[in-house]
Image (cartoon, rainbow, N blue to C red):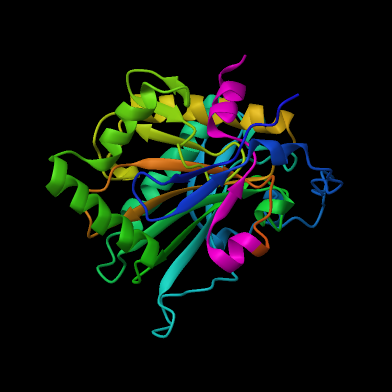
Amino acid sequence: MAIKKSEIRKSFIFNKYVIITPGRVLRPRDLKEQTDNQPNPNCPFCAQNVAKKNVVGRIKLKNDSVTCLKNIFPAVSLDNPKAYGTQEVIIESENHQKSLADLSLQQIESILEMYAKRTRAIAKNKKIDYILCFKNQGSKAGASLLHPHSQIFATEIVPEDLREETVLAQRHKIKTGHCAYCDIIKMEMESNRKIYSDKHVVAFAPYASQFHYEAWVVTKRHTDSIISLNQNEKKSIAKVLKHLALKMQKLNLSFNYFLHNVISDKHQHFYIKIQPRDSVWAGVELGSGLVINSVSPEAAAKYYRNK
């Protein structure tokens, strides 16, 4: 069997390069996901252990709920001018052992709604300019607790990667007259990296994927924030997230997903990036900044498209 040759690809937006190396997927490996999927009576996110004083929001469902808590171990806080910001935890279900793939579409929609509610509330603080909603699922993704949860991190500092994205997106707009992400949608929907499309959202494996089975979910409508999503868009996003989660579960993949909101940037395009953590960045990535990805985005998209 002939091994496909490697290919260096540049991100459509960023000045970042990825080496797609299909042949390296055949390398011997013996490291496995190590998440302990066992009940824990001391879990701080189980209902009996949640302190009511820490609850800042709750969406009740028929047989479950989505609850937002103050993070009691924050990296930033509103009373610390040297590290100003706020952090919250979203408890996605009362069931300790469920993962994203196990949640109902209504539950996932409610999680998105909680992101929107808390983003709207946090954004009222004029000192805050950056809000990150993110999820770590699995030990390789940095999750410290099994109970299904995600987090919100907000600060007055806009990370350098986001500043760079804004600048490069503005350059693209000046050069072409188009939003960079709108152009990415058009390009990827005509490629074999397309995963899903409906009236409201698209999903694809990006051309220069940095992670095995990386996927982006982007709204077709040019809107800048989780706050401005309509109900149909949330339903579509929930459907795609559940599908991707089910497919990643079959591969036993840890993953992160995240959605950014730079308050001062009204030209950003809403997206969610899902980055599985099947591989670990090592010497080449950390030393050179070049990322090696042995699962091509075309192969990843084909896997996600298959029922």
* Residue 47 to residue 179: above or below: below
* Residue 73 to residue 66: above or below: below
Quarter holding residue 189: top left
* Residue 196 to residue 81: above or below: above
- Identify which residue is drawn at 58% across, 45% down: 211
Q: What residue range appears in magenta?
A: 284-307
Residue 159 seen in render:
no
Quadrant assignment for the N terminus: top right
Residue 60: where, in percent of width, then height?
A: 52, 37
Q: Report the side of 127 relative to 136 (left or right).
A: left
Residue 283: where, in percent of width, then height?
A: 67, 64
Specify whether residue 265 is painted magenta: no
**Which is more toward the observer, 210 or 234?**
210
- Identify which residue is drawn at 44% across, 41% down: 272
Quadrant assignment for the C terminus: top right
Q: Residue furthest bottom?
A: 82
Residue 86: where, in percent of width, then height?
A: 44, 68
Residue 208 seen in render:
yes
Q: Report the side of 268 relative to 105 (left or right).
A: left
Q: Residue furthest top?
A: 307
Residue 161: where, in percent of width, then height?
A: 39, 61
- Identify which residue is drawn at 40% across, 46% down: 11
Quarter holding residue 271: top left
**Which is more toward the observer, 166 or 201?**
166
Q: Report the side of 106 relative to 220 (left or right).
A: right
* Number of marks in the rendered image: 0
